[in-house]
Image: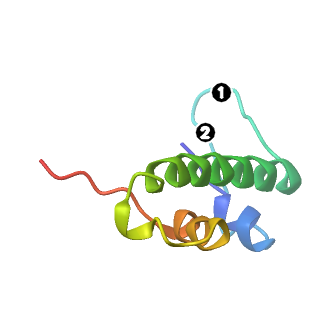
Amino acid sequence: AIFGELALIYDDPRAATVMTVNECTFWFINRETFNYCVEGSHYEQTKRNLSALEHVMVLKELSLEERMMVADVVKLKIFR
């Protein structure tokens, strides 16, 4: 189970307490590390998007900065 991510995102105290019935291993992450992981993941996704957008003819006239803005917000949708 994962809990506390909203507290990490919004820098607020957790809204719930977790209790276990059995012995368990508990992992935690501090806010700085969490943000670093989220930003790194977002950066890698933006790079993949930018690479894919280079093959879209309608976007060829955009500057690199403009394509990066599109790559930053575009979402992948797979149709079957």
Most extreme residue toward the front is 61
Compare residues 12 and 73 and report the one nearer the observer. 73
| Few, some or many residues within 10 Å of mark 2 (<14, 14–19, 20+) | few
Q: Is residue 41 above or below residue 15?
A: above
**Residue at x 17% of width, y 53% of height:** 79
| Few, some or many residues within 10 Å of mark 1 (<14, 14–19, 20+) | few
Compare residues 10 and 63 and report the one nearer the observer. 63
Q: Which numbered marker is on residue 41?
A: none
Q: Position of residue 19 (x, y in %)?
A: 64, 46
**Residue at x 73% of width, y 55% of height:** 39
Q: Position of residue 63 (x, y in %)?
A: 61, 71
**Residue at x 66% of width, y 59% of height:** 5
Compare residues 15 and 46 and report the one nearer the observer. 46
Asked if the residue at tag 1 contacts the one at tag 2, i.e. Cβ–Cβ closer than 8 Å, the answer is yes
Amino acid type, mark 2: Thr
Amino acid type, mark 1: Cys
Which image quadrant is residue 1 in? top right
Compare residues 42 and 26 and report the one nearer the observer. 42
Distance, label 2 to label 1, CA atoms, is: 7 Å
Q: Quick one: SS at disc 1?
A: loop
Look at mark 1 in the image and give the residue it sits on: 24
Q: Is residue 50 above or below residue 61?
A: above
Q: Which colour scheme is used?
A: rainbow
Look at mark 2 in the image and give the residue it sits on: 20
Q: In this view, does 2 lie above or below 6?
A: above
**Residue at x 72% of width, y 34% of height:** 26
Q: Quick one: SS at disc 2?
A: loop
Q: Where is residue 15 in the image (x, y as percent from the top left)?
A: 67, 70
Q: Position of residue 42 (x, y in %)?
A: 64, 54
Which image quadrant is residue 53 in? bottom left
Is 29 on the left-hand or right-hand side of 54? right
